[in-house]
Image (cartoon, rainbow, N blue to C red):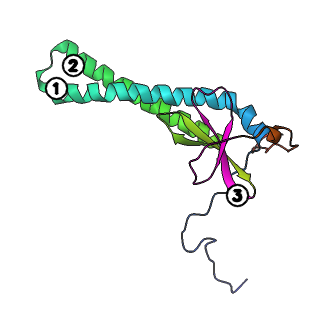
Amino acid sequence: MSNTPNRAGNPAGKPRRKDEAALDLPTARQMLPLVRSIVSDIVTSREALSRLVPERDRLDRHRRDLVWQERQRRYQVAEEIRTAETQFTTAEAELSALGVGLVDAEAGEVDFPTRINGRPAAFCWKHGEDALAHWHYTGDGQRRTIPTDWDQQAVTPVRFRGSP
C-alpha cells in the first residue's frame, strides 16, 4: 500500500485545454465538399428559423383569437421550428466532430484550424465560395489569399481518430 493520498488529476477542476488538430491545406481542401454540404444545411436551417420565429411570435401573441386554421398553422410552425433547430444542432455537431469551427452561421463561414509560421491560424471558407482560397491568423479577422506556392509544399495530412 502506498501512503500517497488519492488526488484528482485535475484538482482545481479547471477545464483542460483541448488541443486543436492543425489541418494542412491539402487535407482541408479534401474536407471541403463534406463541409460545404454541412454548411448548406446550417444556412438553410438558419434561414428557416429567421422566417418561422417571427410568424410563431405573431401567432402566439394572438393565440386566443385564432380561428382553427390559424391554430393549426401555429402548431405546424412550432414543429417546423423544432425540426430546423434539430437540423442546425446536428450540422453544428458534425462540423465540430471534423475539427472545423463555425464562425458565422448566418453567412455560413467556417475555419479549418492550422498553424502558419508557428502561430495559430485558420484556412477560412464562406458558403457560396467555389474553393478554399483564404486564411487568417487566429484572432485576426483579415482574410488573406492563400499563396499559390503553398500548394506545392509537401505536407503530410492529419489523420483523424479511427482512420487507418
Q: Name the residue tied to disc 1.
A: 63
Q: Name the residue tied to disc 2.
A: 71
Q: Is residue 100 visible?
A: no
Q: Helix, strand, or loop for circle 3?
A: strand
Give the side of residue 135 with respect to residue 67, left or right: right
How far is the residue under mark 3 from the one under mark 2? 56 Å
90 or 54: which is nearer to us? 54
- Segment colored magenta: 118-145
Q: Earlier in the sequence, mark 1 or mark 2?
A: 1
Q: Helix, strand, or loop for circle 1?
A: helix
Q: Is residue 72 above or below residue 100?
A: above
* CB within 8 Å, label 1 to label 2: yes
Q: Is residue 161 above or below residue 85?
A: below
Residue at image position (15%, 15%) is 67
Quarter in which the N terminus is drawn = bottom right
The three-letter amino acid code for the residue at tag 2 is Arg
Q: Earlier in the sequence, mark 3 or mark 1?
A: 1
160 or 119: which is nearer to us? 119
